[in-house]
Structures are given as structure tokens and as C-alpha cells.
Image (tube, coloured by chain):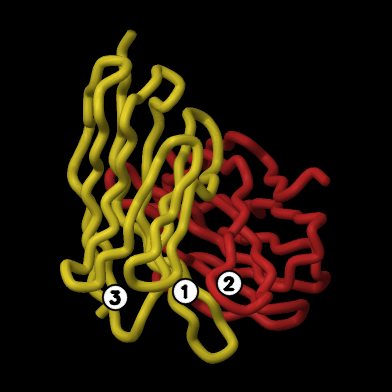
Chain colours: A red, B yellow
Amino acid sequence: NAGVTQTPKFRILKIGQSMTLQCAQDMNHNYMYWYRQDPGMGLKLIYYSVGAGITDKGEVPNGYNVSRSTTEDFPLRLELAAPSQTSVYFCASSYPRGGANEQFFGPGTRLTVL
Amino acid sequence: GNSVTQMEGPVTLSEEAFLTINCTYTATGYPSLFWYVQYPGEGLQLLLKATKADDKGSNKGFEATYRKETTSFHLEKGSVQVSDSAVYFCALFLMNTGFQKLVFGTGTRLLVSP
């Protein structure tokens, strides 16, 4: 299993540009998440999904959109990039077996908006 | 609200020194508690977890005990190695109806020198 994969690894955007961060998992996990990690701030939840066709906002959703058309894929869309979106983005997935379940993280995408 | 507070880093130690990284939490209900580790350039990996009061999680020589009376989950290791250099995140796990959520601390960077 590849686990959780993310592309690209690095990206530089100009203000106002748009892009999609890709995330895929091959573990048949129902739950998927997008986080951003800012220096010294820990991880903040942007959006999450409990299954194909179902998504909802996390703590910091403004400026982002998501879709979940398949169990495997959970892309994150930035429509009008702003410097405040410079961050490292992590995708994660988990399987709700009941109890405290581990989230599996991808390697991250480092995004810089100039 | 739900939150996690970790000691600020970096924590700088010599190889074979004893490690403690403090973590305290506030939460409604009875959360499970996790420690995640992030090695340079990688995503987060689960290090250990505890699901109820007085449980001890352990892995790779690291230990943490869920102390409900002090709302703490401090990470310890008796003898650190250079390869333990990483950022450590304490997190609490919340189970809401239809959704599982992790709330992360800000992370503590550990630097171990030979």
C-alpha cells in the first residue's frame, strides 16, 4: 500500500492564482481530512469528509473548497491565492472502526504565495 | 473549549539523556490522547496513544500516561538517540456524532546531539 499520497510536494503561486492540491489514499478509509501547518501553530483542520459525496468545514475553511467524488480522492482547491495561505498542507485519512482511531498522514505540500 | 498545550521548544539534549515533553489538555467529556511525531520533511506518524484515564501508551522506548486528575499526558523517554530528533505533537481525540476529530498542540521540536 502507498498509504496517503499528496502532489505536488512544493509549489509557488502568485497572488490571485488558483490551484488544486491532490490527495489520494489506498486504504479504503472513509474519513479524510485537510490540515494546514503554520510555523509554531500546530495543525488546523480546513475541511473533512466522512465518505464519498459528504464534506464539511473545519476550523479554517475560508479561501478553500473540497470535493469527494470517490473514496480514494480528496482534492483541495484554492481559488484566489493569498499570502496568508502560505503554509504546509497535510492530507490525512482514517477508518472509523470505533474508539480512538489513528489518522494516517501524507508527506505534505509546501505552498508559498508571493 | 477543547485545547492542548505543549511546552515550547526547542528541547536540546545530548544523546542518552532523559526526555520529558509536557502536555496538558482541556476537553469536554473523556477524550483519547495521542502523541504524533514528525521527522524532517515527512508527515506526522502516530507514536503512541491512551484511551482512558491511567492508561499508559508506549512505543519505541517512549511512554506517556493519561492523568485525568492533572489533565496531562507527558511524553518521556529514558535515553534519547540522535534519530529521535523530530517535532512531537500532543493531540486529543474527540468523537462527535458522525465525526472523529483531532485537536493538536503546537508541537515541540527535539534536537539530540551526539
CB-based contact (under 8 Å), mark 1 and mark 2: yes
Asked if both marks, 2 and 3, belong to the same chain, the answer given is no
Q: Quadrant of residue B78?
A: top left
Q: Residues within 10 Å of mark 2 (few under 14, many from 20)?
A: many
Q: Is residue A94 above or below residue B106?
A: below
Name the residue beneath numbered marker 2.
Answer: A48
In this rendering, which labeled residue sits more in front, label 2 or label 3?
Answer: 3
Q: Residues within 10 Å of mark 3 (few under 14, many from 20)?
A: some
Amino acid on which the number 3 mark rests in the picture:
Asn
Amino acid on which the number 1 mark rests in the picture:
Gly
Amino acid on which the number 2 mark rests in the picture:
Tyr
Whether residue A28 can be seen here: yes
Q: Secondary structure at mark 3?
A: loop
Percent across and percent down for residue A106 are 63, 47
**In the image, what residue occupies the spot 62% across and 61% down?**
A77
Name the residue beneath numbered marker 3.
Answer: B2
Q: Where does the C terminus of chain B fall, quadrant-wise?
A: top left
